[in-house]
Structures are given as structure tokens and as C-alpha cells.
């Protein structure tokens, strides 16, 4: 496993200017956190997005999304967005902002 460096840079660019952003290796890829709460990440060439549970369930009905499952057990509130769903800059921005807004709404860790 690993992560697409170019996609990670695109994500980092979209998080630029937000307060409390850090990154760390997680799930075999890279995760971007806001005040210690995961917002999004990159695993291979997929984007990982963390959303409020019900919002994530609705998002799974959108094209290019699937449940976040790296160990045989899907994690509630997390989803993958495939490369076709984040190819355009506005697509990626939408998903990164959704994850960042959710992470920003949580209590800092």
C-alpha cells in the first residue's frame, strides 16, 4: 500500500490556509487531520473522506464512492472516492471541503 503523491499534494493545497492541519501516516496511506480529527486522506489513488455518519451514508449513493473498508469491516462515516470522482479540481475541492468542515466541527483532540 501507499499513496499517490500528486493526489496528496492536491489535497494539501486545498487545506492550505485552514488552522490546525497536520498529516500523518494512517491505514497504509496518509491522513490529513484538523485539530487532531481526521478530515480526509489518500490511500493508493483513492481519496478517503470522513463525514458525519448520515451524510456519509447519503454520499455512498453518489458516483465513484464506496465504503471505506481496509480490513474487512467498513468504518461508519468514512468512504473512498475513486480517481474518476476527483479528477477535476472542483470535484476534489468539494470532497476535501466536506471532510474538513466535518473535522472542524468536532472537539479538538
Image (cartoon, rainbow, N blue to C red):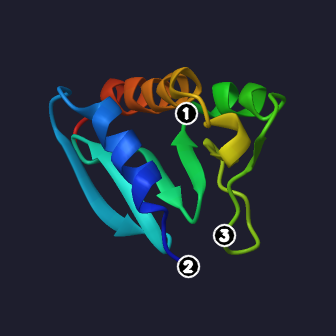
Please tell me which residue lies in front, 57 or 16: 16
According to the picture, the residue beneath numbered tag 3 turns out to be: 70
According to the picture, the residue beneath numbered tag 1 turns out to be: 51
Gap between marks 2 and 1 measured at Cα: 23 Å
According to the picture, the residue beneath numbered tag 2 turns out to be: 1
Contact flag, marks 2 and 1 (Cβ < 8 Å): no
Image quarter of the N terminus:
bottom right
Q: Earlier in the sequence, mark 2 or mark 3?
A: 2
Number of callouts: 3
Image: 41 above or below 89 = below
Q: Earlier in the sequence, mark 1 or mark 3?
A: 1
Image: 104 above or below 46 = above
Residue at left offset 31%, top offset 46%: 33
Q: Quadrant of residue 91?
A: top right
Gap between marks 2 and 3 measured at Cα: 11 Å
SS for dot 1: loop
Where in the figure is residue 105, as x and y percent of width and height?
35, 24
- Image depth: mark 2 or mark 1 in front: 2
SS for dot 2: loop
Q: Earlier in the sequence, mark 2 or mark 1?
A: 2
Dot 2, crowdedness within 10 Å: few (<14), some or many (≥20)? few
Q: Quadrant of residue 56?
A: top right
Where in the figure is residue 107, as x and y percent of width and height?
27, 33
Left or right: where does residue 83 sit relative to residue 3? Answer: right
Please tell me which residue lies in front, 54 or 97: 97
Residue at left offset 17%, top offset 26%: 17
SS for dot 3: loop
Where in the figure is residue 95, as x and y percent of width and height?
54, 29
Contact flag, marks 1 and 3 (Cβ < 8 Å): no
Amino acid at each position: 500500500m501507499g499513496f499517490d503523491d500528486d493526489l496528496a499534494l492536491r489535497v494539501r493545497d486545498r487545506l492550505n490556509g485552514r488552522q490546525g492541519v497536520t498529516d500523518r501516516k494512517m491505514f497504509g496511506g496518509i491522513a490529513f487531520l484538523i485539530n487532531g480529527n481526521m478530515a480526509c486522506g489518500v490511500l493508493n489513488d483513492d481519496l478517503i473522506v470522513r463525514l458525519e455518519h448520515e451524510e456519509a451514508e447519503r454520499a455512498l449513493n453518489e458516483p465513484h464512492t464506496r465504503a471505506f473498508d481496509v480490513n474487512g469491516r467498513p468504518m461508519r462515516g468514512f468512504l473512498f472516492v475513486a480517481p474518476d470522482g476527483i479528477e477535476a479540481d472542483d470535484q476534489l475541492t468539494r470532497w476535501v471541503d466536506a471532510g474538513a468542515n466535518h473535522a472542524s466541527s468536532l472537539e479538538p483532540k
